[in-house]
Structures are given as C-alpha cells and as structure tokens.
C-alpha cells in the first residue's frame, strides 16, 4: 500500500472539501430544522472516529447534547427513541454501508431529519437523506487515509458553521474559522517540514511490539483512527485509549511500563488529565512520546520526544495530528522495507 501517495494530496483534498464545500454546508445548516432533542450521529467501522469527533465538536461549540452510535447499536437500542423532528447525521464515505444505511432509513421512517456526511451525491444514503455534506477527497468508493482525514476535518467544520449560523456571534468562532482557512496550508507544512520528525519518531518505534496512543477530547478519535491504521498496515499492535481509560488502567500491573504516544495540545480541554497521566507513567522503564504544540510545555517535559505542531483549537489541531500520524505510518513502512531489502550484490 502506497501510504505516502495516499496522503500526498491531502492539502488539496482538504482545500476542496472545506473551501468549495462551505456554501453548500452553510445552506444545508440553514435549511435544517434542528429540533429540541439530541443530535444523533451514526458511524460504523472506519467512519466511526469521524462520527465520534462530532460529539466534541457539536457539544463544545454549540452546547447541544450529542449521541454517537455505531449503526448496529443504534438499531438495537436507540432507533425506538427517535421522534419526529429528531436530527440524525449518518457518516459513510461511500454511502453504501449496509448497517449505516439501514439505521439511517429507520430514523427517516420515524420522522427524523436525515443528514449525510459522505463523498457520493448519488449514493443510496445521500439520495435517502434530506441533505448531504459532501467531502471532496477524490476517493468515493473506499475510505482511504486521505478521505478519512477529510471526513474527520469536515465534521468539526460543519459544527463550526452551525455555531456561526445558529448562535450569536463570538470572537472565538472568528478565530476558529481562520484556523480552518489555514488548515490546508498547515497540512502542507506537516508533509514537507515534519518529514524528519516523523522519521525520527519512527526510528524510536520501529522495534516495538505494541504502542498505546492516548488522546483526550477531540484528540481521542484521532488516536482511534491512527491506531487502526497502524495495526492494519504495520507489525505494531496499536491500541487507542481515551485518557480517562488510561488513568483507570494505570492501576493494573505493568501498565506504567508501556510505550505511549500522547496526542494533545495546549488548548485541549483534557490537557491536565493528559499531563497527569504522562507524569504517572513516567519512570526509567517508560517510553513516552507526544505530538502536541510548543505551548504545551508540561507535556513536552514529561516525555522523551515531542513533535511540535502549530498551536490550534482541538477541532483543527486534531485532524492535523492525524495527518502527522499518517506520515509516521509511511515512515514506519519505509523503514520496514529498507530493513528487509537485500543489499545489492548479496546472495538470496
């Protein structure tokens, strides 16, 4: 699998999704009757991290209660709770995922306003929905690394637009909108300027058998998506933990000797919990790393190696860290290929 090729075009895909999609996203937000109950967000398999990112984005920016469900769980437990004027947002890149489509149609049959976050305007999900937020990653039929990044970024972008349209003006939303405008530029910076940092971190991880990726708030779904990619494409047994889960697991024998990679930022609402977890895990046998920003001095001081990205809000910082981790996977694969390729002229 050409991971480097999949993420090389990420800045363009982000620009297409966020800039060209903005008028359509705003029109759909304005045209939706949002109702009084919780927002239900559905996602399954590789689309689930993007759905989970919506919980922090919508609750944090709009103060709305959000229920995130895998489609099968929604069908078993939540579908009966749907009432007319409920709003359901179904996430599926292809728009053809059986369970997600079934759950979406079940919600629609109960009178819910059905929205879709997808890449195909002609998919069964998009055609069944009252409106579709379209990502423009160029990968409509499968969830590749680039399209997964676009789904993730689009979810927070939609929440930001909803906050601007439906809530009173606030200067923090101006700042957040400016960060989204610069996100494709930041993505180019990650792919061009942090290659050596990704290679260095990969050299530290190359001989490990397992790795725990730890995130809090919007950074946990990024950790979840990155761990799935690592486990699928590299020999690493990668596991994602929410920082609250990690704190509970630290009481178990051997937990403090793990190798952990923390995802955070100085503007993360869960940063104190992340700092405390890194402190508790620290010791002579602990291998701790972090992807954060230069203003997060406490986390930088608690780990042996920190990769520093721009200081951004959670909703814009977390997709950027996800992109860096995709670059890290590319470096891990490159190291693995170079170590297994026989030297020129050697016997086989």
Image (spheres, rainbow, N blue to C red):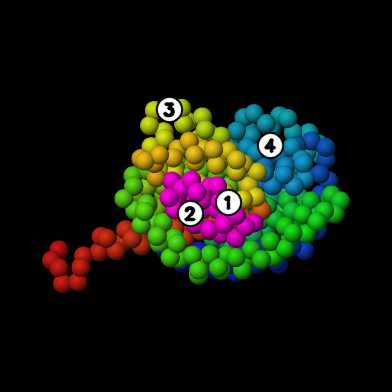
Q: CA distance from mark 4 to mark 1?
A: 31 Å
Query: Farthest residue toward the left?
Result: 347
Q: CA distance from mark 4 to mark 2?
A: 34 Å
Tell me which numbered mark, 4 or 3, is placed earlier along the sequence.
4
Name the secondary structure under disc 4: strand
- Look at the picture and state if 293 lies above or below 285: below
Among numbered discs 4 and 2, the one appearing first in the sequence:
4
Q: Residue at x 15, y 68 (%)?
A: 346
**Residue at image coords 49%, 41%:** 278
Residue at label 2? 306
Q: Which of pointers 3 and 1 lies earlier in the amino acid sequence?
A: 3
Residue sitting nearer the eye, 14 or 251: 251
Quadrant of the snapshot with the N terminus: bottom left
Q: Secondary structure at mark 1?
A: loop
Lower sequence index among marks 4 and 1: 4
Q: Which residue is mark 4?
A: 67
Q: Which element is circle 3 on?
A: loop
Question: Badge 2 local density, few (<14 within 10 Å), some, or many (20+)?
Answer: many
Give the number of the mark in front: 3 or 1: 1
Residue under numbered circle 3 = 252
Mark closer to the observer (3, 2): 2
Membership of 226 in magenta stretch: no
- In percent of the image, x 78 and y 52: which residue is there? 162
Neighbour tally class for label 3: few under 14, some 14-19, many 20 plus, Cα within 10 Å: few
In magenta, the rendered stretch is 288-312
Residue 116: percent from left, percent from top? 69, 50
Residue 210 percent across, percent down from the top left? 37, 43
Label 4–label 3 contact, CB within 8 A: no
Left or right: where does residue 123 sit relative to residue 345?
Answer: right
Asked whether disc 1 touches disc 2, contact meaning CB atoms under 8 Å apart, the reply is yes
Q: Residue furthest right?
A: 168
């Amino acid at each position: 699998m050409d991971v480097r090729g999949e993420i090389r075009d990420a800045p363009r895909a982000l620009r297409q999704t966020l800039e060209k999609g903005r008028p359509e996203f705003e029109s759909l937000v304005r045209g939706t009757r949002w109702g009084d109950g919780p927002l239900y967000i559905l996602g399954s398999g590789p689309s689930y991290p993007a759905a989970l990112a919506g919980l922090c984005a919508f609750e944090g920016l709009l103060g709305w209660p959000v229920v995130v469900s895998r489609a099968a769980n929604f069908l078993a437990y939540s579908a009966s709770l749907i009432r007319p004027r409920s709003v359901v947002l179904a996430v599926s890149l292809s728009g053809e995922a059986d369970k997600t489509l079934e759950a979406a149609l079940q919600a629609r049959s109960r009178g819910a306003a059905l929205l879709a976050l997808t890449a195909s305007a002609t998919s069964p999900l998009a055609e069944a929905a009252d409106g579709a937020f379209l990502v423009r990653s160029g990968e409509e039929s499968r969830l590749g690394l680039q399209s997964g990044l676009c789904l993730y970024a689009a979810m927070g972008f939609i929440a930001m637009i909803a906050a601007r349209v439906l809530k009173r003006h606030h200067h923090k939303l101006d700042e957040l909108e400016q960060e989204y405008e610069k996100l494709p530029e930041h993505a180019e910076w990650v792919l061009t300027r942090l290659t050596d940092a990704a290679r260095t971190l990969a050299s530290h991880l190359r001989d490990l058998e397992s790795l725990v990726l730890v995130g809090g708030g919007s950074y946990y779904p990024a950790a979840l998506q990155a761990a799935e990619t690592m486990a699928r494409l590299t020999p690493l047994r990668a596991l994602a933990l929410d920082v609250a889960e990690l704190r509970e697991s630290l009481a178990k024998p051997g937990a403090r000797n793990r190798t952990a990679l923390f995802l955070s930022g100085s503007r993360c609402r869960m940063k104190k919990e992340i700092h405390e977890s890194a402190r508790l895990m620290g010791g002579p046998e602990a291998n701790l790393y972090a992807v954060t920003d230069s203003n997060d001095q406490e986390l930088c001081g608690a780990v042996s190696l920190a990769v520093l990205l721009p200081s951004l809000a959670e909703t814009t910082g977390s997709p950027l860290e996800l992109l860096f981790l995709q670059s890290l996977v590319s470096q891990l694969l490159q190291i693995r290929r170079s170590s297994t390729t026989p030297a020129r002229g050697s016997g086989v």
